[in-house]
Amino acid sequence: MLRWTGGDARFFQIVFQAVLLTVGVLLRDFSLLPWQMGLALLAAAATQAFWLRVFRLKNVGYLSPLITACGLSLLLRADTLWAHPLLACLAISSKFLLRVRGKHVFNPANFGVGLALLIVPGTWVSPGQWGNDLGIALWLVALGATVAGRAGRNDAAWLFLASFLGLLLLRLLYLGHSVPRIWEILCHQSLNGALLLFAFFMISDPMTLPDHPRARHLHVVLVALLAFVWQFLFYRPNGALWALLFLAPLVPLWDAIWPAKRYIWSENRTLHNKCCVAR
Amino acid sequence: MRKLALFTLLTAAVGAAQAFCGFYVGKADAQLFNDASQVIVVRDGDKTVVSMLNDYQGELKEFALVVPVPTVLQKGQVNVGEKAIFDRLDAYSAPRLAEYYDPNPCEARLERRRNEAAMAPVPATAPAPLGKSLGVTVEASYTVGEYDIVILSATQSDGLETWLKREGYRIPANSAKALAPYIRQNMKFFVAKVNLAEQAKTGFQMLRPLQFAYESEKYMLPIRLGMANARGPQDLIIYMLTKNGRVETSNYRTVKLPANMDLPVFLKQGNEFRNFYKAMFGEQAKKEGYRAVFTEYFWDMGWCDPCAADPLSPEELRKAGVFWVNNPAAAASPPALPSQGRMMPMPGAQPVMLTRLHVRYTPETFPEDLMFQETKDRQNFQTRYVLRHPAKIEADACPEARAYLDGVQKRQEAEAQQLATLTGGDISTIRSKIPLLPVPPAPPAKAWWEGLWGSTNGK
């Protein structure tokens, strides 16, 4: 199977995201309609097809729009049917249009969610939707580490979690909580499904992270810092999502300062039958 | 009357709970308990109005309340509200029954299109539940209504604990530890006790709710302080009044309670519905491991369907703290409707969104204070349960009757199963409460092979 998929991390990502979506809808009371998901998938694929034609791109498959549509479905909630497909379309378009030196600036799902929260009526993100369940957290880490590991970006996921939770620990110590309370709160925060999902399925996206390890680590720590400030100093929800979105424009700068070999999905290296995988 | 009964009931079920957003402290050794806690939080931007209702049962002179607040509250920011507003919000957003009556299948035969089931909402009662050297500064001190209030700031938790003790407040053990994080967050402490002379003037038997208005980026309720010496799970009902959409917790799971299903019609009798709701809530909270916050209601207060009670009038909304609603008494010109200007089919209704959240928490399962976010979700939700009354007919009344009664029997069994699943109740007890309809005689059972060879077999 590995050979068949060319070892592309995204194949795993799609399968795991589909599993998580199913689990979420069935067990975690996600207010997500099958139609919203279906339309998001269709819109994402159609947008990809459109831009591939416009830019006459060949040898690019359809894994990326599937991932973006799944990611949007996992994160975003809406009280209309049109929000998901519209945002999927805008997210995929951002990948083709918002580029610096041939590399897209924003993680498409992150871009879509940010746009939704800023301007699309009837949309929201439920950061508490996964709860803080140990079982679910372990599954998220296991599945997520597999995907991020295949993409060679596990370092980003773990570094983000370590930085964010480290800052949280400092805050709890500063606030003078008792040791048992610190442990309880730290567990509560670190088992948050939305945080783990972000770490392993979003910030670890190799296409939008700096390519040089040093730059990548700096960027991830900055994202964790801003997420922490947003959430615990300004008391606003969804810190991680906003931090990644706001800091994404810095990545081209990091890439210029610390140039490194550009990441390429294995699919785009070996090609051919990969579109069949996507379909 | 029904409500009163319900309160008692929940009191028994919930047991000895503490205050939700602070703790009640006594000046004597009396055991003080605060049972069903309710709070109204009105918020738009950073502007917040919080109203707290406690079910304090002890001696008034023993009553004292400590609540962490984000800013120093001046006298004008504190008000003594009316309990009636809580009752109105409760009644309006209460879990409800909707009844439908099956049309008589025999009549329906003649007049199929007539008589859509009449819907009669039963305003079912809500389970309302369901000194300097110490580093302490008195920032403000005043009397509002029957309360003597001081706003304290502190630099160290030990000092605050000592100050409170020196002033005669008997505060729970471990208080310093619980107070410390709030001090470090630069929060102030609202301390209220009852001014007995003022209280006597009011003529009220029970303590009226306290309201605070302030601006803060923190959209939260400090539930942790009340857990200082909590025993067992505590219940809290939160009425969130916002402009744009449904409110949910951002650091805990928010779950909609199971609703909108058909249930056995006996729930209409006596206390059955209240008992059902209490059991159902208990079962769902347990199922979620006491780690979730439940949504019981979300609706634009401009209308309701079915209405368990009339929507609140603009005046009532203002009393609840909804500052963006024009006060018709104050406005000389016709009141301009705030914000969206939606259709308001109900007179007196206002474009205000009400989210009713119900949480049963324990110190272990809710290690952090509740943080909230207002979403852009405007999909209405209510805990509404449907009773379908079967038509009263004999099995041989008409050709359609048998099939109908057969269907009713299956439906009743499904309703009983549903009820058992929701409440974790005993199915046979539930079945025994369902009145039996005239059962259509079952056709005699045939062996599978009978008729296989046709009627000529054996001849």
Image (spheres, rainbow, N blue to C red):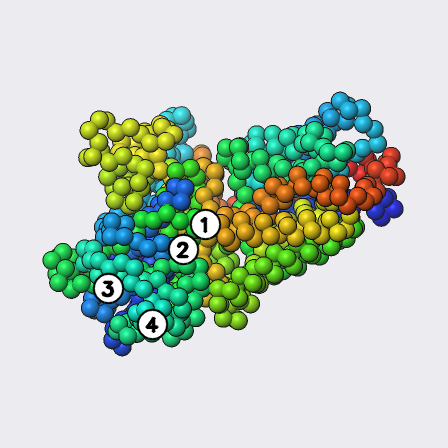
Tell whether B302 sits left or right of A250: left
Provide residue B361's location: percent of width, then percent of height: 44, 61
Q: Earlier in the sequence, mark 1 or mark 2?
A: 2
Q: CA distance from mark 3 to mark 4?
A: 23 Å
Provide residue B286's location: percent of width, then percent of height: 48, 61
Q: Residues within 10 Å of mark 3 (few under 14, many from 20)?
A: many
- Name the residue carrying label 2: B221
Respond whether the residues carrying marks 3 and 1 are from the same subunit.
yes
The quadrant the N terminus of chain B occupies is bottom left
Tell whether B47 sits left or right of B194: right
Q: CA distance from mark 4 to mark 2?
A: 30 Å
**Looking at the rendered structure, which numbered label has been put on residue B372?**
1
Residue at 39% over, 58% down: B187
Q: Are marks 4 and 1 in contact (CB under 8 Å)?
A: no
Task: Give the residue type at disc 3.
Answer: Lys
Q: CA distance from mark 3 to mark 2?
A: 21 Å
- Look at discs 4 and 2 and give the one toward the viewer: 4
Residue at 32% over, 64% down: B137
Q: CA distance from mark 3 to mark 1?
A: 29 Å
- Name the residue carrying label 3: B193
Q: Are marks 4 and 2 in contact (CB under 8 Å)?
A: no
- Name the residue carrying label 4: B133
Give the SS element for disc 4: helix
Residue at 42% over, 37% down: B244
- Look at discs 4 and 1 and give the one toward the viewer: 4
Q: Earlier in the sequence, mark 3 or mark 1?
A: 3
The quadrant the C terminus of chain B occupies is top right
Task: Give the residue type at disc 4.
Answer: Ser
Q: Is residue B295 visible?
A: no
Q: Residues within 10 Å of mark 2 (few under 14, many from 20)?
A: many
Q: Are marks 1 and 2 in contact (CB under 8 Å)?
A: yes
Task: Give the residue type at disc 2.
Answer: Leu
